Amino acid sequence: MALSQTTLSSKSLYANAHSLSPKPHQPSFSLLPSNSKPKSLQPITAVHAAEPTNNKVAVKESAPAAVPGSGKWTVESWKNKKALQLPEYPSKEELEAVLSTLEAFPPLVFAGEARNLEEKLGEAAMGNAFLLQGGDCAESFKEFHANNIRDTFRILLQMGAVLMFGGQVPVIKVGRMAGQFAKPRSDPFEEKNGVKLPSYKGDNINGDTFDEKSRIPDPNRMIRAYCQAAATLNLLRSFATGGYAAMQRVTQWNLDFAEHSEQGDR
């Protein structure tokens, strides 16, 4: 069996799940009041310690940059590669301040999680599992809500159950979320009614409002994107380990295909 991969947008995921799950049998898991209005959020900017510490701390020196064309990998070797779609920030000093702040933050994904996924992808490459990938084209700051995260996670679980019943193999579920903010563009500029502005490239770069102020790339948006990704991962890990993703709960959602299928009658 060759490696199979399914990539779907969140809209199509919602449509599929609606036809699979009858409303009378779906429990409601509202995490936040539906009538709650989003509060205005204060911008997050790069911050540093007011005064340097007097304690001597051993700092590990960064690895030397690889010589261009040598083919040797280092932590900094990616900077020698040709990169497209990069934003042009108006202030290099502000960009460096944001990067210094992000470098001090803890990682969003840990090495053990990456190794675990690598092993599972190997099983899919050998034909012993199926790879399901789904999520939004790009996440936004405006739609950041616990219920949206829960619904996307639930649909992935439902689709995983469908594929598991049909293929009779384990399903590796990969969410396109918790960090998918950027949007590559074929044209660096957008024109409306004779007004030409830089294209919207994702909430971690600039805003989607068509005005000059919103379209200027702001490096501080990367800090907000980090915070949103961290909160999203925290909730997803809680769902995955807290019982919400258990097969017993998935079967309680009583999908039609499982009740009225050859596999379901076994």
Image (tube, rainbow, N blue to C red):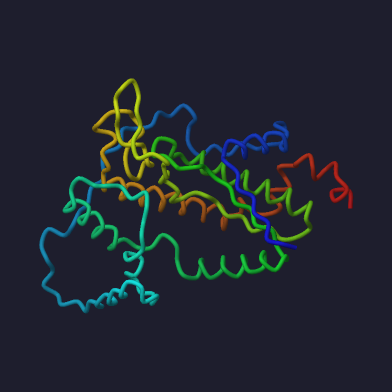
* Residue 10 x %, y %: 56, 40
* Residue 250 x %, y %: 69, 48
* Residue 178 x %, y %: 46, 50
Looking at the image, which residue is at 44% across and 62% down? Answer: 109
* 1 over 157 or under it: above or below: below
From this viewpoint, which residue is outermost toward the top?
193
Q: Quadrant of residue 143?
A: top left
Which quadrant is home to the N terminus? bottom right
Looking at the image, which residue is at 23% across and 76% down? Answer: 59
* Residue 125 x %, y %: 66, 66
Number of numbered discs visible in the structure rendering: 0
Foreground residue among 20 and 179: 179
Looking at the image, which residue is at 72% across and 65% down? Answer: 127
Q: Quadrant of residue 254?
A: top right
Q: Quadrant of residue 68?
A: bottom left
Foreground residue among 188 and 56: 188
* 266 over 261 or under it: above or below: below
Left or right: 33, with 76 as reference point: right
Looking at the image, which residue is at 63% across and 69% down? Answer: 122
* 34 over 264 or under it: above or below: above
Foreground residue among 70 and 227: 70
Left or right: 196, with 18 as reference point: left
